[in-house]
Image (cartoon, helix red, strand yellow):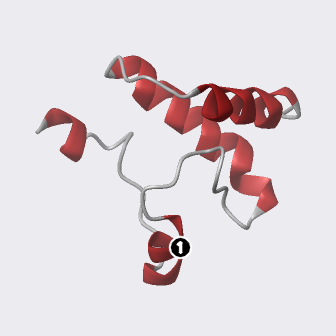
C-alpha cells in the first residue's frame, strides 16, 4: 500500500505515454522528452532504493548510461 501511494512513485502522465510505457523498465523505455530523462531515472533509482527493489543488469546498465550524462 505504501509503495502504490508513495508520491515519489506516482507520476501524472498522459494516457498515451502511460500505455506506451506499460510495465517496461529503463532498459526498454525512456520518456520521449530527453530533457526529463535524468529526473525520471533518478526517481526510479530512489523508489527502488526506498523499497529495496531489484533491477536487471540491462536496466542497471541503462540507468548508469542515462545518469552518467546528467548535469
Left or right relative to 40: residue 8: left
Q: In which quarter of the image is residue 68?
A: top right
Give the answer, above or below, for where 46 lies relative to 37.
Answer: above
- Quarter placement of the C terminus: top right
Depth order, front residue of 58/39: 58
Depth order, front residue of 38/30: 30
Residue 42 point in image, percent of width and height = 61, 33
- Quarter placement of the N terminus: top left
Who's the residue at 51% across and 36% down the image? 44
Left or right relative to 60: residue 70: right
Name the residue furthest front: 57
Residue 37 point in image, percent of width and height = 71, 49
Q: In which quarter of the image is residue 63?
A: top right
Who's the residue at 71% across and 54% down the image? 36
Who's the residue at 72% across and 67% down the image? 32
Residue 30 point in image, percent of width and height = 67, 56
Depth order, front residue of 32/57: 57
Name the residue furthest bottom: 16
Give the answer, above or below, for where 67 lies relative to 10.
Answer: above
Left or right relative to 34: residue 42: left
Q: In which quarter of the image is residue 29?
A: bottom right
Give the answer, above or below, for where 60 lies relative to 40.
Answer: above
Depth order, front residue of 59/45: 59
Who's the residue at 52% across and 65% down the image? 21
**Alpha-carbon neighbours of circle 1 within 10 Å: few (<14), some, or many (≥20)?**
few
Left or right relative to 5: residue 11: right
Quickly name the residue at label 1: 20
Give the answer, above or below, for where 18 lies relative to 69.
Answer: below
Determine whether the residue tagged by mark 1 lies in a helix, strand or loop.
Answer: helix
Residue 46 point in image, percent of width and height = 48, 26
How many numbered circles are shown?
1
Amino acid at each position: 500500500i505504501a509503495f502504490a501511494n508513495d508520491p515519489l512513485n506516482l507520476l501524472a502522465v498522459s494516457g498515451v505515454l502511460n500505455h506506451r510505457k506499460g510495465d517496461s523498465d529503463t532498459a526498454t523505455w525512456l520518456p520521449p522528452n530527453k530533457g526529463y530523462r535524468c529526473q525520471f531515472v533518478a526517481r526510479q533509482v530512489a523508489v527502488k532504493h526506498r523499497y529495496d527493489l531489484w533491477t536487471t543488469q540491462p536496466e542497471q546498465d541503462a540507468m548508469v548510461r542515462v545518469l552518467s550524462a546528467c548535469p
